[in-house]
Every structure is written in C-alpha cells, then in structure tokens.
Image (spheres, rainbow, N blue to C red):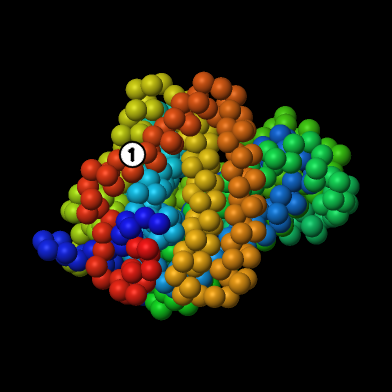
Amino acid sequence: MSTDAVLTPSVTAGHQAHRLAGKLGPTAIVFMVVAAAAPLTVVAGTFPIGIAAGNGAAFPASYGVCTVVLLLFAVGFTAMARHIPGAGAFYTYIAHGFGRHAGLGAAFLALLSYTAVQGGVYGYIGASLNELVTSHGGPSVPWYVYALVMMGITGFLGYRHIELSGKVLGVLLVCEVGIVLVINVAVIGHGGASGLSTAVLHPGNFFSGAPGIALIFALAGYIGFEATAVFRDEARDPARTIPRATYVALLVIGGFYALSSWALVSAWGDADVVGEATNNPATMLTDTATRYVGSVAGDLVQIFLITSLFAALLSFHNVLARYIFSLGNTRALPERCGRSHLRHDSPHIASAVQTVSALVLVVASVVAGLDPVTQVFTWFVGAASVGIVVLMTVTSAAVVVYFRRTRLDTRPWNTLIAPLLGFAGLAVLSVMTAVNLPLLVGGSDTLAAIIGVLLVGAFLGGIVVAVMRPHAGTQQDENPDIAKEIAR
C-alpha cells in the first residue's frame, strides 16, 4: 500500500491551513445540491431527449434505477464522511482509499469536469436569455454578452458568504420546482391525454428502445449531489448534517424527476409521447404547460428556465471554488487559493480563480465560433458526464478499501455490501457513458476521442503534480491513528 499522505488541510512550517466557516443546516445544503441539479433545465431539456432517444414512455423508470444505485453509493459515502476532515469530496475520499497520487489525479479530473459543466451552462443561459428577449420584441444580442453578465453576478455572490448564495438559491429553486409541480398537478388532474401512463408498470417496456441511453441522460440530472460533502466546513454539526442532506437530496431529486417525467409522458400519452419528444424537443415542456395550465404558465416556464440555469451556475461555482480552496490548502495549487476572506469567511481567491477559468472557456468558445447550445452546452456537459460518473465509481471502490484497511467502521452493510453494490451499478453506467460518448457530443467519434484524451490527461496531470510536488496533499492535523493506518 502506498505511503502517500492523504489530501486534507495541512499545517506545516510556513503553511497555515485555512478553514471556511458557517452554520449551514441540512435544508440549506439540500437547496444548493438540488439547485445544482437544475431541475427545470432537466425537465425541459433532458426529458425529451431521454424519451426520444432512450426507452420512450418507460423513461421515468430510469430515475428509479439511478436513485437506487446512488442511494447504495451514498451509504458508504456518508459512512466515510464521518472520518474524513476537510471539504474535498470525491477526490479526498479517493486519496484516503488509494493514496495521494490517485487523489490528486481525481482532483484535477473533477476540476475539469465541473468546469466543463459550468462552461456549458453559460452557453445555454446566454442563448436562452437572448431567445426570451427577442421573443418579446427586444433586440438580438450575442449569447456571450448575457453569459458575461451572469458571470459577473455569479462571481459577486460566490465572493461573499455562502449563506447569501444559499438564500438566493432557495428562492430560485422554489420558483422552478413550483411551476413544474403545478404542471404535474394539472396533467394528473386532467387524467393526461389518454389516461395516466402505465408504461412503467410493465418491466419489459424499460428494456425497449435504448435503455442505456435513457440511464445516461437520467444520471446526468444528479450531477452535483456530492456538494453535500463539499460544504462540510460550513455545515452545522457536519457528522449529522452531511449524511442527512445527502439522503434527502437524492430522494428529493429522484422522486421529483420520476414524478415529473411520468406526468410529462401522461400529458401526451404512451403512444404519442415519443413522436412529440422527437419532433418538438425544445418546446415540449412549454407546450405542455400551455396545453394544461395556460399561456401564462408557458411564459413562466421560459422565465424560470433562466433562473434554473443561473441557480446551476451559482451552485457549481460554489462547488468549484471549494475544490480550488481545498487544493490550495493542501498545496496542490498555489497556497493563496486556500485563503479565506476575513469578513465573509468565503474562499474569495478561489472564487475569483473559478470566475477567470469560466471566462477563458466562454472566450475560447466565442473565438472558435461554437454554437452555444448544440456545441458549447452539449459537448461540455457530455464530457463532464463521463468524468463525474468515473469519479463516483472510483469513490465507491475507495470506500471499501479505506474501511477494509482502517477498520474504523466494521458494519458490513455500510462499509462493504452497499458500497460494492453501488460500485457495480456505477461501473455499468460508466461503461455505458463511455461507449455512448459520441452520442453525447453530437455523434462525432473524433470529438469523443479528443474529450477522452483530455479527461485522461487531467487525471495524469494530477499525478504529475503529486510527483513534482512531494508535499502537495500532505497533512498533519488528522487523527494520528487514522493517518498511521492510511500510510500502511
């Protein structure tokens, strides 16, 4: 076993670790996690694709499968969270399981993956804002102008105390979830187009069409749920808050998606929903809202889609800033990145770094002449999906290795059975995502290969940092008994 020290905040000669501060409860953290999932964006954008390209009217069952797999993953994830200091999330867990080199590789892969998600969302929100303005008689403005405005607002909120972001996200989340629930109630109340959907009641329907594609698009809706652990330092009583927030977030996300996708299928009927999703994917939800609730609801869907995208931007910005902050504290990145603001208790320098990285992506996309939706959003989010699913899979394995070695928790279900079942499910999803990557990025095998090289390169880059900077990731403030076991 590697003798690499693990990645947690260090206190060594000449280096003073910084901690973030806050008193976030489970509710506030759940708001940020669910906001990162961008539920309205998923309902409006992912549902039609999953229905059309996946398994049709049985698509809602995909969320049941993904929720079960991720709940199994969460059992080991939350059990390990009680023993892992710091707020590094997946990469910290991987480091404790497989050593510093693997941990830093995972950290850089996570940075690339989540930055790609944010870059993609900037493209989508820029295009959506322009469409909203022009549809109401306003002037047409390049998408990147709106993206830069949103970037400025996101950077401002990310610079300040996390509780401000939590309040903003709470309000936005209520709006977007509220309009979808209104549509759900209206569809169910009307009995759908030809009765409520029964496709999910027949298991054979799940395997019709392309269930692998359906699972990939369903899983994309959960991206960001690891943020429960990222906010550990700012949580009130993290040993209790983080597990509760993780389980609640997964159940809320999974339940909301399953209900809403079932209602959307019912709105058009089991026989006709694939045709509607194929012919009118961009307006399917708006058309549903107008048909069952009224034209005002259709307009509100357009408006709240913008707020949903902004909520996702702010959530991912906060997650990335804390990744950078944690890496600065462990000296994998410049130590300045690990400093916290004296008044706001925020990772202000890491937040600024993240804003600059997002700016670079947007500028590069503009210079390359990429379409903000079909290329920027689709390509970037497709690439991120592969990286994040792989990270979750490796984390499941790290949980098993960590507890087998340290014996800090000997409960079989929490430390062996559930993590192994979660690993098996995620491994299958990882293979599906990798095999179907060309589809996720517009059907280009060449682009898929380039993305694969970039993801592998990010992981190898982290390993290079670990080799070139032997003290990167070292720590001295952890329980010495735990550290001794990890070093074996």
Q: Nearer the viewer, residue 400 or 268?
A: 400
Query: Which residue is farthest left?
Result: 14
Label 1 residue SS: helix
Left or right side of 416 for 122: left
Left or right side of 247 for 193: right
Q: Quadrant of residue 205?
A: top right
Q: Which residue is mark 1?
A: 461
Image quarter where the N terminus lies is bottom left
Task: Give the residue displayed 63% in from the left and 45% down from the top.
Answer: 429
Q: Nearer the viewer, residue 447 or 350?
A: 447
Dot 1 amino acid type? Gly
Count every numbered label the image shows and give the total.
1
**Residue 343 horizontal/vertical position (percent):** 20, 67
**Residue 140 horizontal/vertical position (percent):** 44, 28
**Residue 236 horizontal/vertical position (percent):** 39, 76
Q: Is 350 above or below relative to 8? A: above
Task: Give the residue displayed 44% in from the left and 70% down from the top.
Answer: 406
Left or right side of 252 for 146: left
**Residue 46 horizontal/vertical position (percent):** 63, 42
